[in-house]
Amino acid sequence: MPPSPLQLNPITTDQSFTTGNVVVAAGAAIAPGVLLQADGGCRILVGQGVCLGLGCVVHASGGDIRIGDGANLGAGVLVVGSCEIGDRAIVGSGTTILSQSVPADALLPNSTLWVKPNVAATTPPAVPQPQAKPQAKPQ
């Protein structure tokens, strides 16, 4: 008979912060410095067994963010907009996710920029050209 799964309770500290409609399921681990912020009319749903690493920022705007059961977000991950991070997905530290869903069982390496195509800028910003300095006229 296989051993029963380890039963965990949500871990929160006074060093993490939630605001708005945020639901954290049983067994989720939330490290210090995590910010979960849901704008008005938006929700953040954190599934069972999710691990949110040190300093993660999850900001739901324009819709809901769902983090699936068993997903793992490394330290310093930024999730903004409306998306779903699939069950058991692993998101490497320093990754930024902007309104683009991550499939179940996906692995995003450290420092990945995961952006919906119409959100990303396709051209670099214009660089201002230096202006000529006025020349003094002899008197």
Image (cartoon, helix red, strand yellow):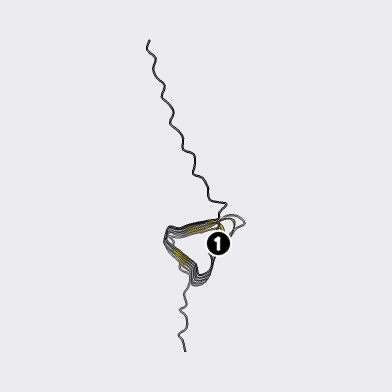
Question: Looking at this rendering, what residue extends furthest in the left direction?
Answer: 138
Depicted 130 relative to depicted 38: above or below: above
Q: Residue at x 46, y 75 (%)?
A: 8
Q: Residue furthest top?
A: 139
Q: Secondary structure at mark 1?
A: loop
Query: Residue 1 placed where, x, y %?
Result: 47, 89
Q: Residue at x 45, y 85 (%)?
A: 3
Camera-nearest residue between 89 and 126: 126
Q: Position of residue 94 (x, y in %)?
A: 42, 58
Is the C terminus in the top left, top right, bottom left or bottom right quadrant? top left
Question: Where 5 sits versus 120, above or below?
Answer: below
Asked whether residue 21 is in view, the answer is no
Residue 64 image offset from top left, x and y in percent: 59, 60
Q: Quadrant of residue 135?
A: top left
Residue that badge 1 annotates: 101
Residue 77, above or below 139 = below
Image quadrant where residue 56 sits: bottom left
Crowdedness near tag 1: few (<14), some (14–19) or many (≥20) residues, C-alpha within 10 Å? some
| Amino acid type for the residue under numbered disc 1 | Ser
How far across and how far down the image is residue 97, in percent?
50, 57
- Residues 54 and 109: in front is 109
Q: Let me know if residue 16 appears in the view.
A: yes
Residue 108 versus residue 79: which sits nearer the camera?
108
